[in-house]
Image: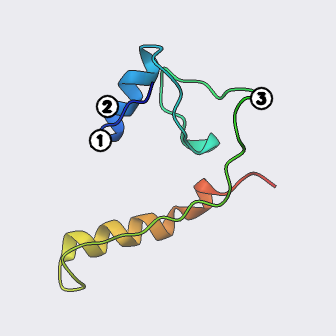
Amino acid sequence: MACTSSSLSGLRAAAVAGLGVTAHSNRLVPPGLAPLPPSRHLPEFGQIEFVVIGPGSQHQTAQALMAAILENTGRLQPEA
């Protein structure tokens, strides 16, 4: 079975309801969910790329979002 949603909230709701698992950075696990231990049944995740696509560089809201993502990318990196 697979669950698709147009929002992260929808995926979180499905995982909290016990319908499956969802991928998150270990540092950004939402309330109500917990990391799974390593398993031979689940693949390891490789590198993940974040891309901001918006209405262009003249749009202040898109620029603010991009700046916030870039300023916080350290939170997404694995602990050394």
| Alpha carbon distance from label 3 to label 1 | 27 Å
* Residue furthest front in the image: 1
Question: Relative to residue 11, is residue 79 drawn left or right?
Answer: right
Counting from the top left corner in percent of width and height, residue 2 is at: 43, 30
Q: Amino acid at mark 3?
A: Ser
Q: Which residue is mark 1?
A: 7
Tell me the number on the disc at residue 10: 2
| Alpha carbon distance from label 2 to label 1 | 5 Å
Residue at 29% from the left image edge and 75% from the top image edge: 63
Label located before the other in sequence (2 or 3) = 2
Residue at 50% from the left image edge and 22% from the top image edge: 20
* Residue furthest bottom in the image: 58
Residue 32 or 14: which is nearer the viewer?
14
**Toward which corner of the image does residue 68 lie, by quadrant?**
bottom left
Counting from the top left corner in percent of width and height, residue 54 is at: 24, 72
Q: Are marks 2 and 1 in contact (CB under 8 Å)?
A: yes
Counting from the top left corner in percent of width and height, residue 22 is at: 51, 34
Label 1 crowd bin: few (<14), some (14–19), many (20+), radius 10 Å: few
**Toward which corner of the image does residue 40 lie, by quadrant?**
top right
**As displayed, is residue 44 above or below residue 16?**
below
Q: Which residue is mark 3?
A: 39
Label 3 crowd bin: few (<14), some (14–19), many (20+), radius 10 Å: few
Q: Amino acid at mark 2?
A: Gly
Residue at 66% from the left image edge and 57% from the top image edge: 77
Question: Relative to residue 16, is residue 75 drawn left or right?
Answer: right
What secondary structure is marked by label 2? Answer: helix
Tell me the number on the disc at residue 53: none
**As displayed, is residue 80 above or below residue 15?**
below
Residue at 30% from the left image edge and 72% from the top image edge: 53
What secondary structure is marked by label 3? Answer: loop
Counting from the top left corner in percent of width and height, residue 34 is at: 60, 24
Q: Are marks 3 and 1 in contact (CB under 8 Å)?
A: no
